[in-house]
Amino acid sequence: MKALLEELGLSVPKTHDLEQLLALLVPHHSVLRSQRRGLAFLTTFAVAARYPGFNAKGRDAKAALRWAGKVRDACRVLLGIPPTKRRK
């Protein structure tokens, strides 16, 4: 997401808040709007997971990886880079 901001010539904030980054990108890439729910979910893993008391369940970790892959692929397409190939 920060690469997209850079490509657009926009300021890249020092943040782990993915919804904040999305808000900056949506005016330029409205297709990313569909990623809002996943980005909100992923943001909890960006900071909270670093501190004691946060325990991600296996199911949550798998969901986070799926969302991260979806967002990454959407950004790669917008940057003109092919999406990653998934192992099955």
Image: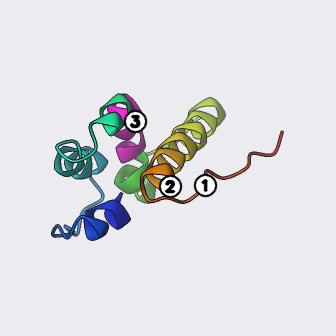
Compared with 13, 43 (above or below) is above
Q: Secondary structure at mark 2?
A: helix
Q: Which residue is mark 1?
A: 82
Per the rendered image, the range of residues in magenta is 35-44
Q: Residue furthest right?
A: 88
Q: Nearer the viewer, mark 3 or mark 1?
A: 1
Left or right relative to 14: residue 45: right
Along the polypeptide, which appears first: circle 3 or circle 2? 3
Identify the mark at residue 41; answer none if there is no mark: 3
Q: Which badge, 3 or 1, comes first in the chain's sequence?
A: 3
Disc 3 crowd rating (10 Å Cα; few below 14, some 14-19, many 20+) is some
Placement of 71 over or under 8, stated as above or below: above
Residue ID for mark 2? 76
Q: Are marks 2 and 1 in contact (CB under 8 Å)?
A: yes
Rendering colour mode: rainbow
Image quadrant occupied by the N terminus: bottom left
- Per the model, the C-alpha gap separating discs 3 and 2 is 20 Å
- In three-dimensional space, the C-alpha distance between marks 2 and 1, rounded to whole angstroms, equals 6 Å
The local secondary structure at tag 1 comes to loop
